[in-house]
Image: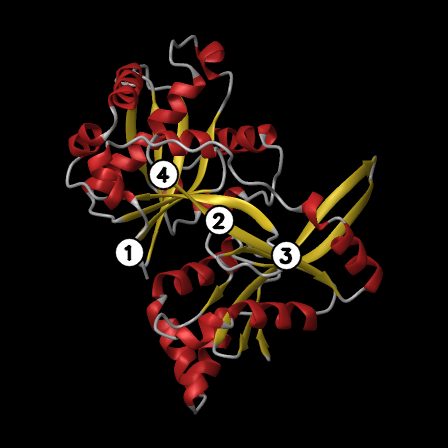
Amino acid sequence: MKSFHSIDSLIGEAECGSGEEFEHYRKIIRENKDLVNFLRFLEVANPCDQEYFLYKNTIIISYIMRYTFIKLGKNRVSWRFRIIGLPVSLSDPGYLTAKEDEKTRASISVILREIANRLKGTTIILNADNELSGNCRTLPTFVFYNRFAAFNEYLDALRSNYRRKIKSILVKGKELVFRKIKPGEFTKEHYELYLSVLNRASIVARVMPIEYFKSGGSEIFEATDKQGRLLAFIQLKELDGVLNFLYVGFRKNESRDLNTELQPVDLYFNLLLFIIRYGIENGYRKIVFGQTAGESKSKVGCKEETRYMYMTSSNPIIKGFLGLFRGIIALGTNETHYNVFKRIHEACDKAPQH
């Protein structure tokens, strides 16, 4: 197992290495060019002790997270642990294999447990797309599989009750103005909307610095009302042909603060529908909406996809604790499912087979 503290040093090793294993690594890098470039960007825009590993035809991506349990004045009780995952709000796993490497994919659960158990300290594998141990799950991700050439086709494919609801939401948001902004136009006002969302969240995995949003590397759209007042923003990122919804910012009490009739729930649904419209109009076949607000995303046509986690530690006491309370620490799935499309579209609405 070889480790690297930058993606470029890993690439250099892969390019210079000889043998079948290094050819696998080079192929993985070629197949994930956008993600590799984004990881390089994140090392600067969101440094969090990123570390990468080459192990058994697999590239492993990890970073360090610190979680504060108790704050007493200037004193804090924190827990430092390693996450095998992506250091940004992406629900993809933190490991890469070559697309046609079925042999490695078949043994990926064993490979991941092996590397996690070899690392010092506490290690948590997040968002694995294979069961790792004891069916321990994390939050599912929600994905929109686009089968439409135009937004109106999407609306027509909805069951009548969902179509009426969505059209009503679009009417309520008809005066919203969406504008793509340049990185330098991202202001403290935008960032405060992002922090407002975090303050309402039950679980906060990480807080991205304002420099992350101001540094580019993605598309940011702001939503304003007819008076030009900022209501919300969304951040989108294309990675190797897939459109990803990364971050959002809006206030829950926006209607009261700005004296607008648009309620927060209607604003949020308009943001989701803008992403679907944008994805359809730009020809994306897959839009990943992430792991929060699953009910809302399901109601606009997203499909839930299971994600798994695994926790271990080189400290036997902590390892025992994690094993004992694994079921409590693990996060549940969305219990309610919505069939929003007409029956004729249900067959083609499923995720494509690999």
Q: Nearer the viewer, residue 262 or 334?
A: 334
- Distance from Cα at disc 2 to Cα at disc 4: 13 Å
Q: Which mark is residue 134?
A: 3
For the C terminus, give its image quadrant. bottom left
Q: Position of residue 209 (x, y in %)?
A: 55, 44
Q: Are marks 4 and 3 in contact (CB under 8 Å)?
A: no
Q: Are marks 3 and 1 in contact (CB under 8 Å)?
A: no
Q: Which mark is residue 302?
A: 4
Q: Position of residue 211 (x, y in %)?
A: 50, 46
Mark 4 lies on a secondary structure that is: loop
Residue kind at label 4, given as amino acid type:
Cys
**Which of the two marks, 4 or 1, is nearer to us in this view?**
4
Residue 122 visible in the current orientation:
no
Residue kind at label 1, given as amino acid type:
Gly
Q: Position of residue 54 (x, y in %)?
A: 53, 77
Residue drawn at x 48%, y 10% as measured from the top left: 256
Task: Give the residue pinned by disc 1.
Answer: 241
Residue drawn at x 48%, y 28% as measured from the top left: 189
Residue kind at label 2, given as amino acid type:
Thr
Mark 4 vs 1, N-terminal side: 1
Q: Nearer the viewer, residue 99 or 83?
A: 99
Residue 281 visible in the current orientation:
yes
Q: Nearer the viewer, residue 328 or 271?
A: 328
Mark 2 lies on a secondary structure that is: strand
Mark 4 vs 3, N-terminal side: 3
Q: Position of residue 278 (x, y in %)?
A: 25, 38
- Distance from Cα at disc 2 to Cα at disc 1: 21 Å
Task: Give the residue pinned by disc 2.
Answer: 306
- Distance from Cα at disc 4 to Cα at disc 3: 27 Å
Residue drawn at x 46%, y 55% as measured from the top left: 92
Mark 3 vs 2, N-terminal side: 3
Label 1, residues with CA under 10 Å away: few <14, some 14-19, many ≥20: few
